């Protein structure tokens, strides 16, 4: 399935989730992510724990297109993607487990039966670039 179709599926699923919720307000980082998913912004920029974290559209190997590859296929769900910043906020920094590059950090967040991993790569501007997946 192309990333465009997965993006449309993700948008529909998020819209359905929020149409059924009683509390319609989004947390600030959820709003940033929703704006990005819906194409209102070209990148999602989060300020988390005094770090600037940026999610770009990317490609098959990194960024949002890579995340979409894991959506549904590897049980990454719409709410996992919408709450992507939560992995850094509540997760723990792993000590280079599964990291093949010293310029990367991996955050792990156990949520229910899910083991979510967020990979951050240091940019030349000292910001962090995102990739995200669920460990099987």
Image (cartoon, grey):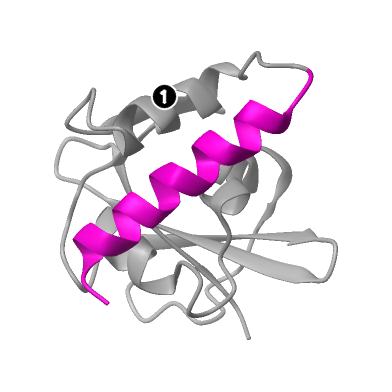
Nearer the observer, 110 or 73: 73
Q: Is residue 106 left or right of residue 112?
A: left
**Which quadrant of the rendered structure holds the N terminus?**
bottom left
Verify whether residue 70 appears in magenta: no
Please name the residue shown 76% across and 17% down the image. Answer: 23
Please name the residue shown 70% across and 51% down the image. Answer: 91
* Count of numbered badges drawn on the protein: 1
Look at mark 1 in the image and give the residue it sits on. Answer: 32
Q: Provide the major secondary structure of the magenta segment.
A: helix
Nearer the observer, 48 or 39: 39
Please name the residue shown 37% across and 62% down the image. Answer: 67
Q: Is residue 51 visible?
A: no
Q: Position of residue 98 (x, y in %)?
A: 50, 82
Q: Relative to 55, does residue 45 appear above or below in the rendering?
A: above
Please name the residue shown 40% across and 43% down the image. Answer: 11
Q: Relative to 19, does residue 66 appear above or below in the rendering?
A: below
Verify whether residue 13 appears in magenta: yes
Q: Position of residue 121 (x, y in %)?
A: 31, 56
Mark 1 crowdedness (10 Å alpha carbons): few <14, some 14-19, many ≥20: some
Label 1 sits on a secondary structure element that is helix
Chain part drawn in magenta: 1-22
Farthest residue, direction bottom: 136
Q: Is residue 119 visible?
A: yes
């Amino acid at each position: 399935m192309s990333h465009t179709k997965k993006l449309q599926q993700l948008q529909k699923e998020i819209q359905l989730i929020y149409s059924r919720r009683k509390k319609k307000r989004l947390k600030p980082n959820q709003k940033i992510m929703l704006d990005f998913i819906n194409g209102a912004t070209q990148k999602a920029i989060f300020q988390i724990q005094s770090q600037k974290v940026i999610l770009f559209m990317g490609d098959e190997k990194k960024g949002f297109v890579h995340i979409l590859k894991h959506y549904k296929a590897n049980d990454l769900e719409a709410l996992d993607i919408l709450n992507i910043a939560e992995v850094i906020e509540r997760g723990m920094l792993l000590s280079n487990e599964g990291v093949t590059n010293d310029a990367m950090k991996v955050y792990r967040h156990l949520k229910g039966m899910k083991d979510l991993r967020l990979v951050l790569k240091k940019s030349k501007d000292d910001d962090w670039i995102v990739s995200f997946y669920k460990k099987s």
